Image (cartoon, helix red, strand yellow):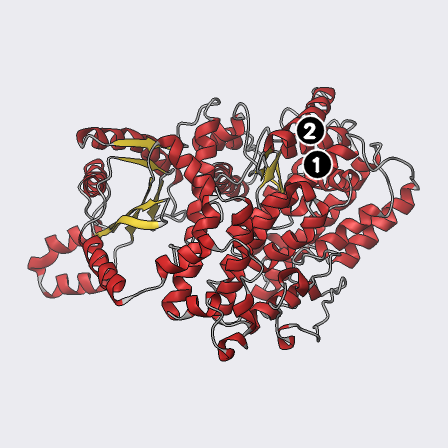
Amino acid sequence: MKYYFFNVLIACCLTVAGCTSLYAQNGYTTLLPEGYIPSDFTQSFSLRYLNSTSSISKEDKRYVRKGKKKFYLKSSYSINDFLLSGKVLFNDPISNYLNAILAEVSKNDPDIDDSKVHVYAVKSAIPNAFATNSGIIFVNIGLITKLQNEAQLAFILSHEATHYKKKHVINNYIKNIEITEGKGSFRKFSNDEQNIAKSSYSKELEIEADSEGLISYIKSNYAKDSSLIQVFDILQTSDQLLLDQPFEYEFFEHGEYIFPDDYKVTDFEEYTSDEDYDDSESTHPNTAKRKENIKTLLNKYAVDGGTKYIISKNSFDNTKKLATLELCRQFLLNHDYDNALYLGYSLLSEYPDEKYFIEKVIGKAMYGITYREGLNPDKVVVSKEIQKIRHLYNEMSEEERKIWAIQYLYKIHLAHPEDEEVKLMIEDCIARLVKVDKTMRDKLFKNGTDKWKQAYYTYAFSEFDNQSALKQWFEKYTPTDKTESKKKRRRKKKKQKGPKVSKTILANPSYIKINKKKKDAARYADSEDVLEDLGKKINKVSSKLSMKVDQLDMSHLGRNDVETFNDNAIVNEWLGEKFIGSDTSMVSPIHNEVIRVADKHNTPYLTWIGAITMKDKVHDKGYAIALALLAPSLIPYTIVHLLSPEKETLYISFTMDVKSGQLVSSDIRSMQIKDSKSLMHSNLYNTFFKLKHGRK
């Protein structure tokens, strides 16, 4: 392939060099894109759509041409939205390594041109990979963490490349139209038969991708052995963290701080996974069928030899390490605290050089668990080690959970007193703890009475020689009658007025037009036009109010704007995590990261703006016509009503202080009028006027 040797060289260099840059003095920091932004990311939705539709043949049947246009419209918008979400990486060590593997495994395949097919890593915990019709392959870091060698990655990429070569994505879309609309042999199918037909066709495509992908893979120098079949076992257990490290309760215990026996589970539900499950309604064949197909093909071609590593084992190990550390971060952002805690616990011995980062993962997971109300409702059978963790904190009271988290986080604080997010988490736990029980300070620090001393948790801080900071925090947050009255006055004052904001960061805004009168309701091109003009309107309004607005604008992204892209990625993840839970005052697991963005822009305030404008069909037509027949004088008004569809515009904005996590200002307006330039200008002006003058 044209760029094969160049790609391999770059991957070998950047995987090692990139790993070095991602391990800061205080440990791992999140994966972020580097260098020039690829054209896949800077291309507008409209241009992507036009390029795609140019491939539609005039020889296709009318419904096929129409279906392809609809597919390209939706997929172009979805791909653009996903690429700019901040989850997709480029020019990073993992993506570079993946592209080098694809170049190696497909170098003898004339249908794969590495100038058209690109692989990007995705910061997602879901173990998955998928290809688009345009030749973009996405590989989630959650999948990379489960693989055992480079050859397995090569096989997966070969499978996804086959989906692209064979145009499976669009073919599946068109086939579903044929089935749904009863074309040809599907004309008399019932709903159930249609669903079975869709499932069967999708499974055929997956088997073809497995088979053709394997044939392409066999032409490479990668190993042709049982490790390929193990890929399907890995995918079968994709919902589980199946690690070898046993979870020991002693890890959290010390001295007389020992968990009661009934906190330690002894009976476990056995996790089982049936590979020959019923796949009649699934999009993929079951694991047993896929494994049997690959075994048959390997026997048919009677090939052996090859190697598990061509790029290098070191590159694979470094890539897997990066992916695994990022997986910890993604678990925390998704509030998947059980998996975050156990993964962190398991990694302490595997990556001792990342001790600080991993200990923080464990501490942040414990902090997150303190916000859980009642028992974990998840009824899915999980691994034995996760059951241990879940049983432990489910047996604890809410106060015990907070003390458990405080004592672990305080260890980290003593080693790294400069870490702001650790301090904030400790303070938040203490504030919530003493709010419920004002005597908790005495129980934990004054040795207490015999009754108090019977509780194991009163020994939580006994291992610390230096308790000064802890005592100060308990002193600070333990309420008295005097402090409570002061707090009430402050809260009353805050309710009346917010801070006056002279500068804010504006996260990438959202805008969508919907016309329910049309079969394809979402008006993507119109939405793009409004977004492209929105930045100018915001500049005009902010200038008039003498405000500064740093826009993280993704609609005018240039190849050199990687810093803006990365700031937007961190901000999006921070916002996404904030609105998973019901309490936005909870300290974010990426608090330090978003503060770095805020400090760079010299403001703690972050604003987001979104709007939906909707045009609906005219309602009550029959009633209006009947009324006109009864009262002919109303005919002119009836005509106007029938010709005037209902319109509604929903405008939303909010501003948050990223340092406190608190909402500073919000604005939600639902207007029964069509959106217009003047209406948008009015809404924007109102948003920034309220910020400027401290009005909530």
Q: Nearer the viewer, residue 186 or 475?
A: 475
Residue 553 seen anywhere in this rendered image of the structure: no
Is disc 1 surrounded by few (<14), some (14 to 19) or many (20+) residues within 10 Å? some
Task: Give yes or no for contact between labels 1 and 2 (Cβ–Cβ under 8 Å).
Answer: yes
- On the image, the x and y values in percent for residue 606 come to 34, 41
Q: Nearer the viewer, residue 378 or 649?
A: 378
| Secondary element type, mark 1 | helix
Q: Nearer the viewer, residue 402 or 663?
A: 402
| Residue at x 44% of width, y 42% of height | 572
Left or right of 416 in this view: 249: right
Left or right of 195 in this view: 509: left
| Secondary element type, mark 2 | helix
| Residue farthest toward the bottom in the current orientation of the protein | 451
| Residue at x 90% of width, y 41% of height | 301
| Residue at x 91% of width, y 37% of height | 305
The residue to which callout 2 is attached is 16
Is disc 2 surrounded by few (<14), some (14 to 19) or many (20+) residues within 10 Å? some
Looking at numbered disc 2 in the image, what kind of residue is underneath it?
Answer: Val
Looking at numbered disc 1 in the image, what kind of residue is underneath it?
Answer: Asn
| Residue at x 64% of width, y 47% of height | 142
- On the image, the x and y values in percent for residue 678 come to 19, 37
Left or right of 75 in this view: 235: right
- On the image, the x and y values in percent for residue 661 come to 37, 49
Please, is residue 553 above or below residue 469 in the view?
above
The residue to which callout 1 is attached is 318
Q: What is the tally of numbered marks visible in this picture? A: 2
Residue 98 seen anywhere in this rendered image of the structure: yes
Left or right of 422 in this view: 538: left
Q: Nearer the viewer, residue 662 or 363?
A: 363
